[in-house]
Amino acid sequence: MRIIDTPPGESLTEAAGHLNKAHCVYDETQTTEYRQQRRNFMELIKSTLQIGLENPIKILHVTDSHIALADERDNERKHALAKRLGAPEKEQHFREHLAYAKEHCDLMVHTGDLIDFTSQANFDFARKVLAEDKVFFIAGNHEFSQYVGEAYEDRAYKMNSFREMMPGLGAPLFFNSRTVGGVNFVGIDDSYHQFETWQITRLKKEIAKGLPIVLCLHAPLFEQSLYEYHIERNGPGESSYLVGCDEDHLPDDEWRAIEIRPRGVTDEAVAFIKSQPRIKAVLAGHIHFSFVSDLAPGMPQFVTGSGYGGIAREITII
C-alpha cells in the first residue's frame, strides 16, 4: 500500500501530483506505464478536515469501484460487458478498501458507481457490501446503467433500472443520512448532474438538526479550478461532468451539453449548498482523479480518484 500524506490541518494540500495555491490534485492517470505499475496495490491519500470536533473520527472515502460481474441469471449482453469491463483487480481493491476501513476507520463512505452496470450478479455483490455496518452509500450513474452508454440516461431510464434491481440494494440510493461521531453524513444522488426539489427539502431538514454535515455526492459541484484542470486533461471543448455548469462552461458537444445543463432547481440547489455553514465539506467522485478545492470559504470539496484503480482517501475529521 502506498500512502500520500496531507499535512495535518492543511486540507487543501497533498504531497503528490500537480499542486498550486488554487487547488490540489493527484492525477492517477499520468501514464500507461504508471497505471500498470500501480494496478496491484492500494493507494491511500490522507487528508484532514478541521471542524472543531471534540473527539476526532476517521472516514475512508471510496468511489467509482465499477465492479463488473454477470452470472447464469444474466443475458449474453451482460456477460459480454462483464468480460470487457471486469477485472480481478477491481474486486481486490474493493476488498482492500473495506478491510482497511473496518480496521482503521469509523466509517467507509462510498459515493457511487460501486457497480458498473445493472446485472443480477452485480446486485448481489452490492447488497452484500451495503449490509456492512460501516458502509455508507449514495448511488452513482452506473448503478442504473443497463448497458454502459447505449442510451440517453434520464429519470425515466433510471426508474426502469431501479425496477430491475427491486427490492433494491439494501441501502437508500437517492437520499441517505447517518450520524457518526457527532457528524451528519448526508448523501444525495446527483448522478445525472441534477438535483430535485424533494432532495433539497430533505437536506434542509438535515441541516435543521444542527450537526456539522459532510455532504456526499457522486458528481462534483462546479468549481473553477477543478473545471480548468478537468478541461486541461480532457482537451478543449470536452465535457467537465460537473454539476452546476453555466452556459460558458458547458461542452461543445450538444449531446453532453443537454445532459449536463442544469435543469429545474439544480442551480438553486448548488447555490444553497454553498451558502450553508453547517455543510463543512463535500465528498464526490465520478471524474476518476483526485482533487481538493474550496467551494466556499471553509467548505472544501474532496474529489477522490478511481476505486477500481486502488485509490482511497482517509479523512481525519477533527
Image (spheres, rainbow, N blue to C red):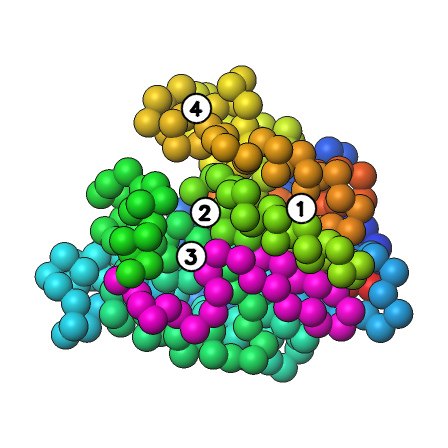
The residue carrying mark 2 is: 191
The residue carrying mark 4 is: 251
Callout 4: 10 Å neighbours few (<14), some, many (20+)? Answer: many
**Residue 226 located left or right of residue 259:** right
The residue that appears at 27% across and 43% down in the rendered structure is 149
- Judging from the image, what secondary structure is the residue with disc 4 in? loop
Label 3 and label 1: CA atoms lie apart by 19 Å
The front one of 183 and 148 is 183
Identify whether 220 is placed above or below 91: above
The residue carrying mark 3 is: 113
Label 2 and label 1: CA atoms lie apart by 16 Å
Asked if the magenta segment contains residue 178, the reply would be: yes
- Judging from the image, what secondary structure is the residue with disc 2 in? loop
Sequence-wise, which precedes: disc 3 or disc 1? 3
Residue 4 appears in view: no
User: Which amino acid type is marked by label 1?
Assistant: Gln
Q: Which residues are magenta?
A: 164-187
The residue carrying mark 1 is: 301
Sequence-wise, which precedes: disc 2 or disc 4? 2
Indicate the quadrant containing the N terminus: top left, top right, bottom left or bottom right: bottom right
- Judging from the image, what secondary structure is the residue with disc 3 in? loop
